[in-house]
Image: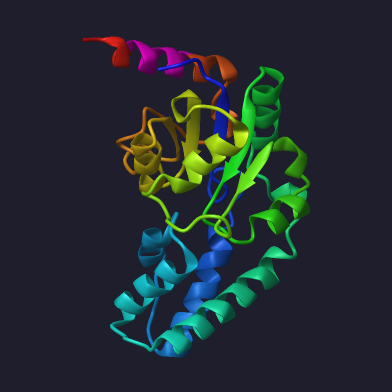
Amino acid sequence: MSGLSACLFDLDGVIVDTAKYHFVAWRQIAHELGFEFTEQNNERLKGVSRMRSLEILLEVGGLALDTATKVALAEKKNALYLSYVMQMTPTEVLPGAVDFLKNCRQSGYKTALATASRNAAVIIELLKIAPLFDVVVDGNRVTHTKPDPEVFLTCASDLGVSPTACVVFEDAEAGIEAAHVGGMLAIGIGSPANLAKADLVVPGLSKISVEQLRAAWDNKKSTVAKP
C-alpha cells in the first residue's frame, strides 16, 4: 500500500445534503403512480443511478412499465429535483466540508468528487466549491454505479495516482464496498450502524482532521502489511 496521495469525496450526504430533494421528487412521482414512497424506502436509493433508483421505486410500488415510460418518468423526476437544486446556496454545504477540503489540499493531497449524480457540476457551482476539486467524475462519465468501483477508479486515473493511494469519503454502504473493491481506504460519513464495513466512521467532515485521516491510513497500512 503506497503513501496517501488523494482524497475522493461522494457528494450527497458527504459534501451537501441533496438527498432530501431527491426524496421529495421521487415521492411526488410515486404519488402520481398511486402509491406511497417512504423515507425508509428512500434509503435504498443512496449511491445508485437515476434509472436504478426508478427501478427500485417501481419495485416498491409493484409496477412494471415499458422503457419509454420509465425514461419519461426519470426525466420528470430530474426536472422536479433540479427545480429544488437550482435554489441552493453555499449555506447548504454540510458543516466542516469546506475547511476539511481546504486542509486536505493544503496538506498536499489531491481532491476529487466521485458521485453518481448527473447534476454534480451544477451543484458545486451553486455551492461555490468547484475550485476545491482537482477532478469531478459524475454519472455522466461512468457506466457502472456503486458498488462497482468505476467512479473511484476513474478519479484515480484522472488524478494520475494509484487507486491504492486513495481514500474515499462515503455515506452509503454501496460506496464503502466500491472503495474496498477498488483497493482504497474507506471512511464512512454517518452512523456506524449503517457503515459497519468502513475503515473509520465519523458523523461528518467537521468531526475529522487531516491528522486523524493520516492515523487511519497508517493503521490500514500496518494491517495490510501484516503476514
Closer to the camera in the image, 73 or 166: 166
Q: Is residue 221 magenta?
A: yes
How is the structure coloured here?
A: rainbow
Query: Would you say residue 187 sits in the magenta stretch?
Result: no
User: Please, is residue 205 above or below residue 212 in the view?
Assistant: below
> Where is the N terminus found, in terms of image quarters?
top left
Q: Residue furthest left?
A: 227
Rendered position, 108 above or below 20:
above
Residue 9 seen from this side: no
The magenta span reads 215-222
Q: Position of residue 19 (x, y in %)?
A: 53, 58
**In the image, is 6 to the left or to the right of 66?**
right
Percent x, y of residue 55: 37, 74
Q: Relative to residue 57, is residue 112 depicted above or below? A: above
Q: Quadrant of the C terminus?
A: top left
**Residue in the picture at 43% in, 59% down:** 48
In this view, 215 is above or below 203: above
Say which quarter of the image contains residue 65: bottom left
Compare residues 43 and 199 and report the one nearer the observer. 199
Residues 180 and 43: in front is 180
Measuring from the top left, give residue 163's x and y in whole percent.
46, 30
Magenta span: helix, strand or loop, mainly?
helix
Give the quadrant of residue 8. Answer: top right
Q: Position of residue 225 (x, y in %)?
A: 30, 11
Q: In the rendered view, does 169 fall on the left or right side of 44? A: right
Image quarter of residue 2: top left
Residue drawn at point x = 68 percent, y = 64 percent:
85
Residue 57 appears in the picture as rendered: yes
User: Which residue sits at x=49%, y=23%?
Assistant: 165
- Residue at point 64%, 46% (across, down): 136
